[in-house]
Image (cartoon, rainbow, N blue to C red):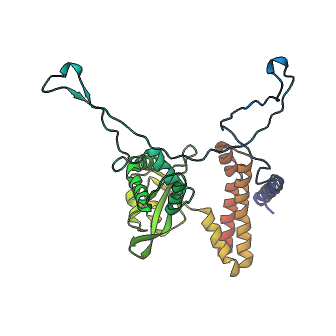
Amino acid sequence: MDEKAAKIEAMAKEIEAENRKRRTRAKRTPSRPSSYRYAGLEERTTVMMPEGVAAGECDINDKDVSRILHREPAKVWVEIIERPLLRMKADKDSPNPRIYQAKAPHAVIGSNHVGADMLTQIVIDKYRYHLPEYGQVRQHVELGLKLPTSTLNGWVHAVPSRLEPVYEALRDDVRNSDYLQIDETPWRIADSPGKSRKGYAWQFLDNRPQSHGLYFLYVNGSRAGTVPRAELRDFRGAIQTEGYGVYDYFELLDNVTLLGCMSHVRRKFTDAQASYPELAVRAVKWLDLLYDLEANLKAKGATYEEIAAERQAKALPIMDAIEKWMESEHTK
């Protein structure tokens, strides 16, 4: 075994040993807390004195403290806004009195029958907590509000137009990154009555440590290369993808570095185990070392600088060894 091979073998043993320790610690750590925990919740204190004893007659030597978790039910309420018409007293007998009135409040959507807080909760319940609109309608009935499903659905569809400036600001910020991860996500698109078709939405993730901003782009469900070309026509930096052919265009640009996805590389070798078990298993074992290294660093809470240093010191030699091994096997 030459010196490089011995060094890589030693690194592999070190990574595997750290990985075993990490997995052992993970088994000892319960996945769920044994009791509830809270931080930042309002605390209300009630002092309970024994009956028949006046507080002024005793000194408090110590106390027992209990904590009881409570929840107040949600409440829907109606804000009534009155805008009086004011006339100057001095103009009481004037044929053209001066009349004043406050401006009507700006409508969030439509005719101003619903507030931003109500709309926010409806959208969060639907998309974050997956509570369907008919379920929300039933929930509101219990709170004293009878709301047609069609009305709630109309509100949900009206919200995106109000959020468009926020979306565009996020989109600009992400595109100003120098390191993007891009993927196409298949969606079922129901744009015809009773029918649906397969389409795609593009995901653009800013992978800078201080950002991780994300936005989706839908262009008629298209997965064509014209979508990322138009979206990133002024981009400069690194683009990481899963290897879909339309991204090859960016490899021809001087201002863009095209990166691959190790997960998709590993998947190819996993699929090849049925045909080439010995070679594929060895490749997967090599690649698993890289994943173990990343998991160990994450478990230790390593900084980005420490992660970069470890990748250079350990991951890069392993990847060089994988490349050399693949080339030698390919020539056989």
Number of residue marks: 0
Residue 109 image offset from top left, x and y in percent = 36, 49
Rendered view: 235 above or below 130: above
Residue lying furthest bottom in this view?
A: 275
Q: State the image coordinates of residue 160 (x, y, percent, origin top left).
A: 41, 53
30 left or right, relative to 158 = right
**Would you say 238 lies left or right of 71 here?**
left
Residue farthest to the right, as pictured: 61
Q: Quadrant of residue 306?
A: top right
- Quadrant in which the N terminus is drawn: bottom right
Quarter of the image with the C terminus is bottom right
As drawn, the residue found furthest toward the front would be 52
* Image spot of residue 73 (x, y percent): 60, 47
Q: Nearer the viewer, residue 58 or 259?
A: 58
Q: Nearer the viewer, residue 190 or 296?
A: 190
Asked if 279 appears above or below 84 in the picture, the reply is: below
Viewer-proximal residue, 24 or 281? 24
Residue 102 visible in image: yes
Tell me which residue sits at (55%, 65%) in the image. 242
Question: Which residue is more in the foreground, 24 or 11?
Answer: 24
x%, y% of residue 205? 52, 54
101 lies above or below 56: below
Please indicate, yes or no, whether residue 180 appears anywhere in the rendered image.
no
